[in-house]
Image (cartoon, rainbow, N blue to C red):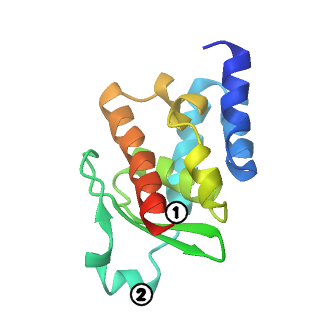
C-alpha cells in the first residue's frame, strides 16, 4: 500500500482512532506489541447492565478467544462494550483500541472506518494471520451492530 493510500484510509477514521493509529505507526514493530498489551489492560469492565445480562451481548465467533460485544447509540454517538478474557491480550488490546478510538463517533463515521484498521496500526507485522482474521471480524461485527441500530 502506498503512503498516500494509507493516509487516505487513516483520514477516514474518527479523530481519536487516527491518533492511536499514528502512535502505532511511529513505533517500531516490537513496541507495537507492548502498546497492544497496554491497551489490553485498559479495556474497561462491562457495565453492570451487561454483566448481569450477558445474553444481550453478541459473540464474535471468528475469534479464537471468547469475544462478546454490545453496541449502543445515544444522541448520535456510538458506544461499544466488550467482554474479553484478560488471558487474551492480543484480541483484548485490539478491541480496546477500537472501543477507545471509535467511542462517541457517529454511526456514519464508524461505518466509514476502513475494515483494515489492524493493517493501518501495523499489527499484521507482529501477529499471526490467524489472529488477524479474528481482529478483522471484530470490526465487522461492530459495524454490523451499528447498522442494525440506526
**Quadrant holding the N terminus:** top right
In the rendered image, which quarter is residue 67 located in? bottom left
Q: Nearer the viewer, residue 61 or 92?
A: 61
Q: Is residue 62 rendered to the left or right of residue 90?
A: left
Secondary structure under tag 1 reads loop
The numbered mark at residue 43 is 1
Q: Residue at the location (66% across, 77% down)? A: 75
Q: Nearer the viewer, residue 25 or 76?
A: 76
The residue beneath circle 2 is: 49
**Residue 44, percent across and down?**
52, 69
**Residue 116, percent across and down?**
51, 33
Q: Is residue 114 rendered to the left or right of residue 11?
A: left
Check the image and report above or below for 49 versus 83: below
Q: Nearer the viewer, residue 2 or 34?
A: 2
**Residue 2, percent across and down?**
66, 12
Q: Residue at the location (24% across, 45% down)? A: 64
Q: Residue at the location (33% across, 87% down)? A: 52
Q: Is residue 19 rendered to the left or right of residue 93?
A: right
Amino acid at each position: 500500500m502506498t503512503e498516500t493510500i494509507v493516509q487516505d484510509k487513516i483520514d477516514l477514521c474518527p479523530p481519536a482512532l487516527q491518533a492511536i493509529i499514528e502512535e502505532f505507526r511511529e513505533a517500531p514493530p516490537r513496541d507495537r506489541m507492548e502498546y497492544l498489551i497496554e491497551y489490553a489492560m485498559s479495556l474497561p469492565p462491562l457495565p453492570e447492565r451487561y454483566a448481569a445480562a450477558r445474553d444481550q451481548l453478541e459473540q464474535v465467533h471468528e475469534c479464537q478467544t471468547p469475544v462478546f460485544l454490545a453496541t449502543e447509540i445515544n444522541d448520535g454517538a456510538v458506544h461499544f462494550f466488550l467482554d474479553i478474557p484478560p488471558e487474551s491480550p492480543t484480541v483484548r488490546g485490539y478491541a480496546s483500541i477500537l472501543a477507545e478510538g471509535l467511542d462517541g463517533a457517529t454511526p456514519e463515521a464508524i461505518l466509514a472506518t476502513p475494515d483494515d484498521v489492524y493493517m493501518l496500526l501495523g499489527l499484521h507485522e507482529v501477529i499471526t494471520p490467524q489472529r488477524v482474521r479474528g481482529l478483522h471480524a471484530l470490526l465487522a461485527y461492530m459495524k454490523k451492530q451499528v447498522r442494525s441500530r440506526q
